[in-house]
Image: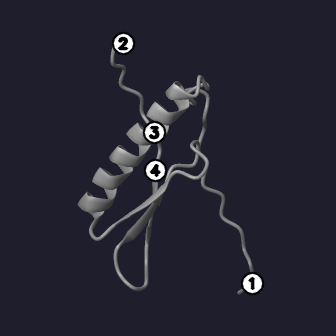
Amino acid sequence: MEKQVKNYRILLRKETEGGYTVTVPILPGCVTYGDTLDHAIAMAEEAIEIYIESLIADGEEVPTEQNTFEYMLAVDTHA
């Protein structure tokens, strides 16, 4: 099978106890953690690869970010 490169948006959240939690919004449940930013990004790459391999093995469609748009919305919460 020919390898394809696909881009996936990841969100990194700095944890109060240290390290970073990473989520992949388009892949539900794809969450990982790393002690440093570089480690968290490497862990995310591995988690995405495993997630996609699982989808392919199960005959499911592999989501892409192709038609995804991102917008940052500022909301006044009066807090």
Query: What residue lies at 66% left-to-right and 58% top-to-bottom?
Result: 73
Distance, label 2 to label 1, CA atoms, is 53 Å
Q: Mark 3 touching mark 1, by CB under 8 A?
A: no
Q: Give the SS element for disc 1.
A: loop
Query: From the viewer's perspective, is residue 60 above or below residue 42?
Result: above
41 vs 49, nearest the viewer: 49
| Residue 60 occupies quadrant | top right
Distance, label 3 to label 1, CA atoms, is 34 Å
> Which numbered dot is residue 10?
4
Dot 2 or dot 4: first in sequence order is 2
Distance, label 4 to label 1, CA atoms, is 29 Å
- Which residue is under mark 2? 1
Task: Tell me the kind of residue under disc 2.
Answer: Met
Task: Tell me the kind of residue under disc 4.
Answer: Ile
Which label sits in the foreground, 2 or 4? 2
- Which residue is under mark 3? 8
| Residue 33 occupies quadrant | bottom left
Distance, label 3 to label 4, CA atoms, is 6 Å
